[in-house]
Amino acid sequence: MGDTTTAGATERLGTRDLLWSGTRTSIVLGPLDLPPHEDLVAAAGALAEAFPAARLGQALDASRGRWVAAGLPVAQLARRAVLVHDGPGPDEVGLSAFARALEAHRTDDVPVRWVVAGRHLALLICHAAGDGGLMLGLPAALLEVARTGRPPAWTQQPDLTSPLLRALAHHYGRHPRRVALTLAAVRAAAAASSATSTGAGGGGEQDDDAGRALLRPSTTAVHAVMGEAQLAELTAWRRAQGKGTSGVAVQTVLVGAALAAVGLPPQGPPTVLVDARRYLPPGAAVHGNFVAGLQLPVGERWDAREITTALRSAVEAARPLSAMTLGAARQLLPRTRAARTATGERVPARPRPVLAVTSMQHPALADLPWDGPAARATATSVSTPAPAEGVTASLTELRGHLNLSLSFHGAVYDTARMAEAVRLATGDPVAVLERAASRRAEVLA
């Protein structure tokens, strides 16, 4: 391990990263057969030198618009980046409570930090450093370096320069007519969004009262795991909906229906996070943020086939590229440069979730040193929700089971009610979906 880090340059955040600079994410993985703490510290130092995109030698400045060099020796950076949790771990307090307690380890001057708690490994990351791909990849990278002394091959792929421009050129350059398709899809989505005021559960009108102010973000989360048998039933239900019905679409309907079942019907169309790397030239790599949240133009009563069609049409029309381009353009305006947070937003007396769904997968997860039966393997994700009524559903299929996490503001929603929603969704998903379908049929009859 050298004396100084090679990852400590000062640089302005790219417009894609500025969009996410106000969001914090974390993931807890376990139980794992973890190496000693000192081996993990040494591995973090090696990653700081070999993989600058991990941002281990940098921090966000006060404006959250620039990466500044930490100016510390690699050994010190590594020790700050890998901590041992000295309180109760997931085995003692449960994964949901532990994920919430992890926030005490987060500091603005360390954008990437691993935390060891017994047989569990957590990663806390500022979203400005990268999206879910980096968040899922870094725990595996740390463990691989600790085990082999070498960083994984994916960390050594060069980061593509100007990836958004390259993606636009690659997708539209040879097929200019695609521009018209994208514009038509954007206009249709905007029209559907303005016309839709309710979501999966129906429910009543939004409150007209001013509500209360959310004085500060209060991110919390709940988590549950869908067993192998329940996941098989859910897969069979998806196939019965028709050929090509999307798994993400079914998961979106399931989460919405579970929230409605506990008295929290979502409002408006759902937002699904889509990886835009599909539009890059073959073999290109982007280690930072390259995802877009797409609000899908679907009706008031969510249907898996309708969401599948909307999602497929959005991807074919390259709406992720248009969303990223528009977001990047807005970041060039001084008034919109600050990252959006929920601080100070007004909350209705009876809030309803604004749902965003992300399906988080990474090939490296399968090769982690899992300790114990597959049924105990868990991946718990927490992400800062925006706006104040936002609820983010993160789903990760792991060793034949489906992990579901809901992130939300604890000052807005009751944690016990959210915990009941994930219990329903993972305990008997088909029953939840069938009840929602019956209610939808009654309304349409």
Image (spheres, rainbow, N blue to C red):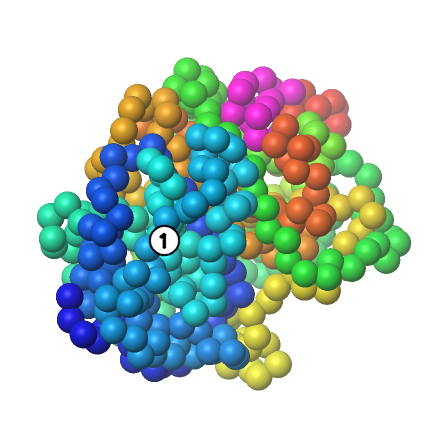
Query: Which residue is tagged 1?
Result: 83
| Residue located at (52% from left, 25% from top) | 426
**Residue 280 in the image, given as x and y percentages of width and height:** 28, 62
In the rendered view, tell whether residue 386 sits above or below residue 53.
Answer: above
Disc 1 marks a residue whose amino acid type is Leu
| Number of callouts | 1
Report the magenta stretch's main SS.
helix
Taking the image as shown, residue 360 lies to the left or right of residue 216, namely left
The quadrant the C terminus occupies is top right
Residue 374 can be seen in this image: yes
**Residue 65 in the image, given as x and y percentages of width and height:** 47, 78
| Residue located at (40% from left, 37% from top) | 379
| Residue located at (82% from left, 39% from top) | 204
Toward the viewer: 254 or 287?
A: 287
Which stretch appears magenta?
421-435
Outermost residue, right direction?
209
Residue 286 can be seen in this image: no
Toward the viewer: 281 or 427?
A: 427
| Residue located at (54% from left, 45% from top) | 100
**Residue 22 in the image, given as x and y percentages of width and height:** 53, 65
Taking the image as shown, residue 191 lies to the left or right of residue 293, namely right
